[in-house]
Amino acid sequence: MHLAVLSALLFFGATTAGAGLFDDEEARKAILDLRQRIDNVRVESEQAAMRSSEDGSALRRSLLELQNQIETLRSEMANLRGLNEQLSRDVADVQRRQKDSAQGVDDRLRQFEPTKVAVDGREFMADPAEKRDYEAALAIFRKGDFPAAQTSFLDFLKRYVQSGYKPSALFWLANAQYATRDYKEAMTNFRTLISRTPEHLRAPEAVLSIANCQIELKDARGARKTLDDLIKAYPQSEAAVAAKERLARLK
């Protein structure tokens, strides 16, 4: 636009000068005025160019600042994603440790919780320690260390008075006493087993063992009566078959 104005002024000046419409003074004034206008146009053009350059620089600075802000936001978002992922891993790790800890507590508690056991045809609930002590005493008996087995079963019966293992413990205690020739104590414990749990799987064997103790003590009459009682009380048992054979030898 400024260039168009400048061209028009030059054209107008040339036209007026060539036509000779003004005298020298007027021509001089016209030329000065024209030059002033040209200078004004040049100044305005330069100022417009400067403003345009400044506007461009400002725009570039704004774009650069915006780009920097975008990069900053991207960096912060990346950091946040990384932090979120780390927090997720931390939470998962905490949850896993809590689960493992809870499982460990459950496992430790189960070590003290009663469990169902089956011994000599009977099922009952027993503490882990109770089960362990009974099996330890029985293992000593099976090794043939009968004095130590007596001690272990006696301790067991004192410690676990209401134990479901009690009839079986009495049976093995009496057998250990029989093995060490303590026949009277053996008979006492066999009879305790029979009187308290006559239906016990080991009861027929206990009666037969009493007869054996009587035989060892030279009480043949008592042995015969015990064997007769065994045959009557437990006629279908293997112990009754053995009792018949021993009765035949005693007569």
Image (cartoon, rainbow, N blue to C red):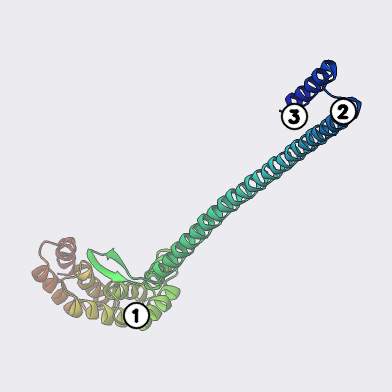
Residue 132 x/y as whole percent: 41, 69
The residue type indicated by label 2 comes to Ile
- The picture places residue 57, in percent across and down from the top left corner, at 76, 39
- Residue 158, picture quadrant: bottom left
Locate the N terminus and report the quarter of the image it occupies: top right
Residue at (25, 69) in percent of width and height: 124
Residue 67 spot, x, y in % from top left: 68, 41
Q: Which one is in front, 72 or 38?
A: 38
Q: Along the polypeptide, which appears first: circle 3 or circle 1?
A: 3
Which residue is under mark 2?
A: 31
Residue 228: x and y in percent read: 11, 72
Could you tell me which residue is drawn at 15 percent across and 67 percent down? 247
Residue position marked by numbered label 3 in the rendering = 2
Q: Amino acid at mark 3?
A: His
Does 111 sit above or below residue 12? below
State the residue position of label 1. Answer: 160
State how far apart marks 3 and 1 are (Cα). Answer: 117 Å
Is residue 120 in view from this perspective? yes
